[in-house]
Image: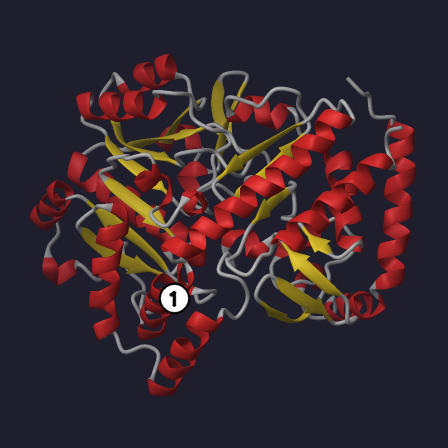
Amino acid sequence: MTVIDRQRLKTALAAEQRRFEADHPRSKALFEEAKASLFDGVPMNWMIRWAGSFPVFVDHGQGARFVDVDGREYIDFCLGDTGAMTGHAPKGAVEAIVERLRKGTTFMLPTEDAVWVGKELKRRFGLPYWQVALTATDANRFAIRLARLITGRKKILVYNWCYHGTVDETIVTLQNGVTGPRPGNIGPAVDPAVTTKVVEFNDVKALEAALAPGDVACVLAEPALTNIGIVLPDPGYHQALREITKRTGTLLIIDETHTICAGPGGYTRAHDLAPDMLTLGKPIASGVPAAVYGFSAHVAELIRRHIDRDSSDTGGIGGTLAGNALSLAAMRATFEHVLTDEAFVHMIALGERFEAGVAGIISEKRLPWNVKRLGCRVEYWFRGEPPRNGGEAAAAVDPELDRYLHLAALNRGILMTPFHNMALMAPDTTEADVDRHTEVFRESVAALVD
């Protein structure tokens, strides 16, 4: 296998940084101006983590491309880290969103769109009952609260290096086999070891042991890990997960917020999963804040038994803007006209093309890297064998190499997802877009190895 020369990498990264600074004077000026009123010069602090020394400021976007304030155009494979998987300003949704804006956006009352959306969610994911929130974080928080309510149990279980938004109980990892706050966890309300059990993905024995005491209300699971590199389930793992949770009286919540990339009904429909509850957010309203959580008929009946209608607005589930008319109109338009069955056929085929292009270069250059795909989501990782769990994936993180490849792509008009090299296909992504990435990836690798 080829070994990356670290000094050569440092030199290449420095050259890319100089190029970035030279190509983005207007973004740099806005960043410096913003520091006077925005903390660290950005509207959300994690935006400082982009590969450049400052973030690119966006002017406008359409489909799978956007243009920055310096007039530079990019093929967007980041797509808002799934939030814009529909593409930017998708034609199939914009008109409905604008019309709803003209007619009013929030009333604390349902609209006819809500009925359509509920039926479509039932068709796509199989669960009969649904509720609407504003973010996937909220959907997960609400699902956890309901699971605790109806089981009478306090703990939850998640996978090491999982991602479920900013839910307190899930910002947790295993460190030398001991559950504790995830590195960087900001001001946890309590030690997450009090609320949460953590096991490695694909470890059936560890799952069995953690659920055996009967004190876990729910397993909150991405059907495949996505935020620490794509980690796919072993054959038969989901069947084991479902059998063990049923046997131990533990509710199974599947979070499809990233794995919606697997198809129009997410990983759940693509692989015939049978969760008790399902959560989903990010792309389902074409960029308008919206999320949903659904549950089985059995769970619905248990919820009805436990919730007092007169106190339902102050029980920790809800939000004044949740289920607003704008979110519902945007969701209906997105499901009906943008993230359609036909769109996913196109997007997944492009994901396969992207994977093949990267895999070919890794093989040609004998790099100790791998590329994994889940539907229309693809990611390359700096490890010879694909990881089987979050711990293995986290151990392979190479921030310097990651930053170089990300910045080299950005300087050549391609935006990858920050923090790791993940690409997502939109309905408007083209074969030419994918092939351009393959070309840039080859060029970037060639600067490191002979």
Query: Foreground residue, 56 or 40?
Result: 56
Per the image, the residue denoted by label 1 is: 337
In the image: residue 295, left or right of residue 72: left
Q: Where is residue 133 drawn, in percent x and y? A: 33, 59
Q: Where is residue 316 drawn, in percent x and y? A: 28, 54
In the image: residue 347, left or right of residue 74: left
User: Which corner quadrant of the image does residue 321 belong to?
Assistant: bottom left
Relative vertical location of residue 326 with respect to residue 416 in this rendering, above or below: below
Q: Residue at x 42, y 79 (%)?
A: 95
Q: Where is residue 387 drawn, in percent x and y? A: 56, 23
Q: Look at label 1 and name its amino acid.
A: His
Q: Where is residue 365 drawn, in percent x and y? A: 78, 26
- Count of numbered badges drawn on the protein: 1
Query: What colouring does the structure picture have?
Result: secondary structure
- Regarding residue 126, the answer to whether it shows in the image is yes
Q: Residue at x 24, y 49 (%)?
A: 294
- Regarding residue 314, the answer to whether it shows in the image is no
User: Which corner quadrant of the image does residue 71 belong to?
Assistant: bottom right
On the rendered image, what quadrant is the C terminus found in? top right
Relative vertical location of residue 15 with respect to residue 34 in this rendering, above or below: above
Q: Residue at x 65, y 41 (%)?
A: 421
Q: Residue at x 42, y 71 (%)?
A: 93
Determine the secondary structure under disc 1: helix
On the rendered image, what quadrant is the N terminus found in? top right
Circle 1 packing at 10 Å, graded few (<14), some (14-19), many (20+), is some
User: Which corner quadrant of the image does residue 106 belong to?
Assistant: bottom left
